[in-house]
Amino acid sequence: MEQTTEIQVVLNSLLKEKKELNDKITEIDKVIKRIRYGNLNLGLSKVNAPNDNDLDKPESQQRQDFPLKADLKIQAIKIFDIIGVACKLSDIRDKHHEITGLRINFRETLRNLNRHDILKLVQPKGNVRGLYWIKAEWIDEDGKLKEQHKFQGFELMYSDEMIEFK
C-alpha cells in the first residue's frame, strides 16, 4: 500500500510538471505566431529601430498597410494594388514573401479571383496560356489595358490588337 501512494505522488508530480511545460510551450507558440505575422516587434536590435529615413520609405508603409491577417484573396488584391502593373505569378509570390516572409502558392487563389471577374489573365491571341495577371478594373471601356498599368517594355512585347483578357 505504501508503494502505491509513493507512486501516486510521483505520478501527480510528473503530471503537474507536464502541464506546466505544456502551458509554456503554448505561450511560446503564441509569441512565435505573433512575430511571424508582424504583430509583435521585439526591438532587440538597433537595425530594426525605425529612424527618420525609414518612415519616409513607401516599403515600410506597405508592410503596415498590408492586411496580414486577412484572407489570401484580400492579400492578393492588395499585392496587385502595391505592384500596380501587369505581373507574373512569380512576381506576386515574391512581393508577398518580401512583405510577410511567408512562401505561399497563389495559383488557385488567382484562378478563383479570375472566376469571379476580379482578376484577368493577359493572353496573346491564339495561345492557350496567359502570362500576366491584371485587375479587371485596369481594363478601360475599349477593352484595352490602361497605360499606367503596363510595365516598362509592355508595348514592345504586345500590341493591343494581339492580346485578349480571359
Image: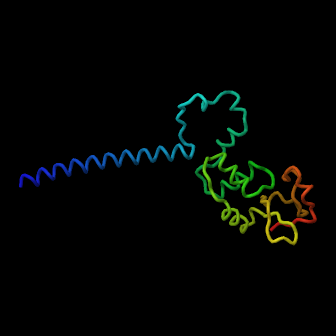
Residue 106's quadrant in the figure? bottom right
Classify residue 57 by image quadrant: top right
Describe residue 153's horizontal placement relative to residue 20 as left or right: right
In the rendered image, the vertical position of residue 105 relative to residue 148, given as above or below: below
Q: Position of residue 155 (x, y in %)?
A: 92, 55
State the count of labels.
0
Question: Is 39 situated above or below 69?
Answer: above
Question: How far from the left and from the top, in percent, is residue 107?
Answer: 68, 63
User: x, y (%) of residue 58?
Assistant: 73, 38
Q: Position of residue 88 (x, y in %)?
A: 76, 57
Name the quarter where the C terminus is drawn. bottom right
Picture residue at 84% right of the left edge, 52% below the top: 149
Query: 36 left or right of 149?
Result: left
Corner quadrant of residue 111: bottom right
How are the residues colored? rainbow
Q: Nearer the viewer, residue 1 or 75?
A: 1
Q: Is residue 126 left or right of residue 1?
A: right
Asked if 68 appears above or below 42 in the picture, the reply is below
Q: Residue lying farthest left?
A: 1
* Relative height, residue 155 to residue 121 (above, below): above
Q: Residue at x 58, y 28 (%)?
A: 46
Q: Which image quarter holds the N terminus?
A: bottom left
Residue in view at x 63 percent, y 49 percent? 67
Q: Is residue 42 left or right of residue 105?
A: left
